[in-house]
Image: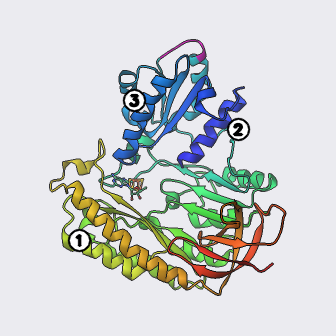
Amino acid sequence: MNAHDSEKVIGTLVSEGYRRVPTPEEAELVFYNTCSIRDKAEQKVFHRLDQFKRDGKGKTFAVLGCVAQQEGEKIFEKAPHVSMVCGSASYNQLPQMLVQLEAGNRRVTGLSLDTADTFETPMTRRDNPHRAYLTIIEGCDKACAYCVVPFTRGPERSRTSTSVLAETRQLAQMGYSEVQLLGQNVNSYRDPSAAGWDFAQLLDGVGRVEGIRRVRFTTSHPRDFVKPIVDAIEANEALCNHVHLPVQSGSTRILEAMRRLYTREDYLRTIGWMKASRRPIAITTDIIVGFPGESEEDFEATLGLLDEVEFDAIFGFKYSRRPNTSALALEDHISEEEKSRRLAIVQERQRAIQIRRNAEYVGRVEECLVEGFNKATGQWMGRTSQNKMLNFLHPAATDLTGQYRYVRVTRAGPNSLAGECVN
Ligand code: 5AD
Ligand code: SF4
């Protein structure tokens, strides 16, 4: 989401007459997009701002994104060399803010969260020429006890299906074959226009756009993950065999404390629909260890869930206290050492699962979208529909980047597959 926000901001700057330079050193105006999902990411921001101060004589600095939204004008005090602070909900005001900046204003802010319209720029500078990100919904109406997002990105705003389809068609015409639909809570999408499409209908519509060969989406919330989404994947070849469905914990008691709005059993029922599908859907998830009050028994429930679901990949995090969140008021905060211990156990357990699951691919032929060439290994790097990295040998001297190739898997590791091209 943040990477795509940066693409939109760059597009806006370029259409306002600015020119992109390769490094911050060469820039007169430095825009720094930030993340505050965990404390570590936020600390990095202030460290980098300090660095900018030392190396940035004569430059103008702007802080964007979630740290900007969260800290607001306090950033001017902590980092007086910063001249502009702007959260993601105000990016559509950037052109006016740039005018103020150029007029010499050194305290420009864009911090309102009640922006009704979803950020759409006339120009987006996409980094990857084959896979395009596309925002369909912004913000989040949930209130998970640990999460800062509702405070930094504001309430949910969906785009109309007409506008999403128009952008998809435009992308296809520009040569993109894969689109990745984005939203903090992508599957609570609801078309605000008269058509009133839900997420499953939108997925199907995007998958039917001529020239679009792959559609991905992230991130889904289990509470809003309904069976028609799986049905849409089954019915439409262009929808990829991959669902990222963050579970956070395998303990119903902790899920309740997290205010996740589902139980372990609810989650497993949803997983059951995907496992029963005739499409081989890869499932990935996010796990938080060490949420306040997480007992050894709760933690064991998470490990048990990993074994039961056999995820294709997980992103594991140590619980991090965030400003404004309701979990701050909970007791029984767990020590850093204990969180690290639990995270290491989760990752070790998952590694064994991935080795086992990936080994099942050996001998199969998978379609890959080629992402590039790795000079060090002499292999092409491809991505399967399940979003697995598949490295392969190919005799061609021409550039395969952006093309689709069929590859027979010959080897499997915990994090990637390797094989040989069969066409
Ligand atoms: N501490 C740790 N992890 C968090 N995440 C979100 N907030 C926190 C937090 N306070 C994780 C969740 C989410 C992912 C994007 O980041 O697992 O799904
Ligand atoms: Fe955060 Fe929960 Fe919203 Fe996801 S659903 S962005 S974890 S509050």
Q: Amino acid at mark 2?
A: Pro
Q: Residue at x 62, y 58 (%)?
A: 180
Q: Quadrant of the C terminus?
A: bottom right
Q: Which residues are magenta?
A: 102-106
The residue that mark 3 highlights is 72
- Outermost residue, front direction? 376
Q: Amino acid at mark 3?
A: Gly
Q: Residue at x 34, y 70 (%)?
A: 346
**Which disc, if any, is residue 79?**
none
Mark 1 packing: few (<14 Cα in 10 Å), some, or many (20+)? Answer: many
Image spot of residue 377 (x, y percent): 66, 66
**Mark 2 near ligand 2 (CB under 8 Å)?**
no
Q: Is residue 366 left or right of residue 296?
A: right
Look at the numbered disc 2 and give the secondary structure of its residue: loop
**Mark 1 near ligand 1 (CB under 8 Å)?**
no
Q: Is residue 10 above or below residue 177?
A: above
Tag 1 or tag 3, which sits nearer the N-term?
3
Q: Residue at x 51, y 27 (%)?
A: 62
Image spot of residue 255 (x, y percent): 29, 65
Look at the numbered disc 1 and give the secondary structure of its residue: helix
Q: Nearer the viewer, residue 303 or 242?
A: 303
Q: Amino acid at mark 1?
A: Asp
Q: Residue at x 63, y 62 (%)?
A: 202
Image spot of residue 126 (x, y percent): 68, 46
Residue 376 appears in view: yes
Tag 3 or tag 2, which sits nearer the N-term?
3
Q: Can you tell which of label 2 and label 1 is closer to the viewer?
A: 1
Does residue 104 show up magenta in the picture? yes
